[in-house]
Image (spheres, rainbow, N blue to C red):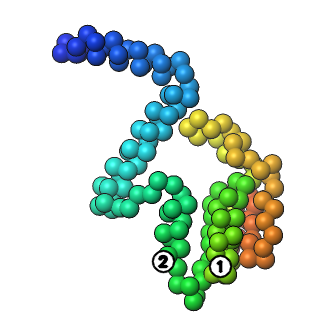
Amino acid sequence: MKNANTHPIIAAIQSRIFLILIKFNPIRTYFLMSGLIIRHIALMNYTFGNPNLYLNRETLWKKMFQTVDKKKGFRGVEFGVAWGYLTNYWLNRYEEHIESWHGYDRFLGLPSEFMSHKVGAFSNLGHPPKIDSPKVCWHVGDIESTLVQQ
C-alpha cells in the first residue's frame, strides 16, 4: 500500500531497490546481514549498556588475551570448529599459556540452512583439522552427545 505522503521520486527509488533486492541474491544477503548486525548491536547496547565493539574477530581475541592471567594460563573451549581457524590462531600465538583446548564439532558442516549458508556449509568432511598439538582434544559429534560425556 502506497503512503500518500511519499514523494513520487522516493517511491520510484524504493520500488527499484525492492526489485534489485529480489533479483540479486548477493545484494539481498548483504542487506539482510547488515540488518542482523544492526539488530545485534542494538540488543548488545540494550542488554549491556555500551559494550566495546570490534571490527574483526582477531582484534577481539587479542583483547581477550589481555585478560588472561599469564602465570595460570587458560583452557580454551570452541563450539563449531570447522577447519580450525580459531584453534590455529590461539595456538600459534599463545600456546605457552594454553593448558588445554577442546573443540566440539560434527565436522560435517551445518545441519540445517542458516542465512545464505546451505546444509553442509563449513564441512570438513567429518574430520577434525590436522592440528598437531598435545593440548588439543577434538570432541566429534553433536554437542548434545559430546558435551554430556565430559
Residue 18, percent from left and from top = 42, 19
- The amino acid type of the residue labelled 2 equals Thr
Q: Which mark is residue 85?
A: none
Mark 2 highlights which residue? 67
Q: Nearer the viewer, residue 148 or 47?
A: 47
- The amino acid type of the residue labelled 1 equals Ile
Instruction: Please name the residue shown 47% across and 53% down the image.
Output: 55
Residue 97, percent from left and from top = 63, 81
Q: Is residue 145 above or below residue 125?
A: below
Q: Is residue 79 above or below residue 70?
A: above
Q: Secondary structure at mark 1?
A: strand
Q: Quarter holding the N terminus?
A: top left
Instruction: Please name the residue shown 35% across and 61% down the image.
Output: 51
Q: Quarter holding the C terminus?
A: bottom right
Q: Answer with mark 1 or mark 2, whichever residue precedes in sequence.
A: 2
Mark 1 highlights which residue? 98
Q: Nearer the viewer, residue 109 or 37?
A: 37
* Rendered image quadrant of residue 110: top right
Q: Secondary structure at mark 2?
A: loop
Residue 128, percent from left and from top = 78, 59
